[in-house]
Image: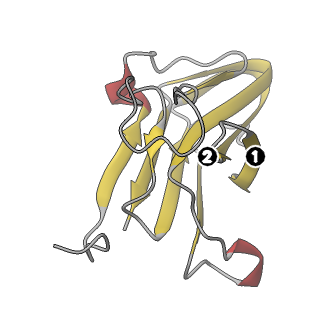
Amino acid sequence: MSNYTPCAKLLWSLAGSGLGTTISGSGNSGGWQGNGPGDILPQADFEGSIKLRDVQDVALYVSAGAVTGSPAFQVQLDVFDSLGNLYAQLIKTASLSAGGSAAPVFGGLHGAGASAYLILPEWGRLSWTCTGGTVTGTEIELWGR
């Protein structure tokens, strides 16, 4: 089987992460856990990072169930190079501030437009910011293909 599988697969989900679905500050899915440059078989399992090496395109779906206050809530895909250096906000959702709102964003080799064309490295993470309130019933999903 090739690295490119033409069917969508869930790469990461907030609901499945154990982090909870109430967000009132900044957070992320986890950091890079490599041992050094060029690690192919790391000692750590990279469970904190999201494995991107088998996908060419990603879709980030974010929804807010309910809000308290006046939140400004955004989610972005950050990536790591082979040395663990962080490149933040390769793709980023619009700000969510109302209950029942959703924000999809797409990127990758095929992209959603010229500004979203990118070659994905091996590892990434999702990070978020929420200021001015709380978002409950949140779902964040990263799909790859």
Residue 94 visible, this angle: no
Indicate the position of residue 58 as horizontal and vertical percent values. 49, 62
Tell me which amino acid carries mark 2. Answer: Ser
Tell me which amino acid carries mark 1. Answer: Tyr
Q: Is residue 114 left or right of residue 35?
A: right
Which sits in the foreground, 85 or 139? 85
Residue under label 1, please give it: 87
Q: In the figure, residue 143 lies in which quadrant?
A: bottom left
Q: Residue placed at 49% from the left, 34% from the top?
A: 49
Identify the image's colour scheme: rainbow, by chain, secondary structure or one colour: secondary structure
Question: In the rendered image of this protein, does residue 17 appear above or below residue 54?
Answer: above
Q: Is residue 29 left or right of residue 47?
A: right
Mark 1 is surrounded, within 10 Å at the Cα level, by few (under 14), some (14 to 19) or many (20 or more) other residues, namely few
- In the image, which disc is placed on residue 82? 2
Which sits in the foreground, 61 or 122? 122
Q: Residue placed at 37% from the left, 16% from the top?
A: 18
Residue 44 visible, this angle: yes
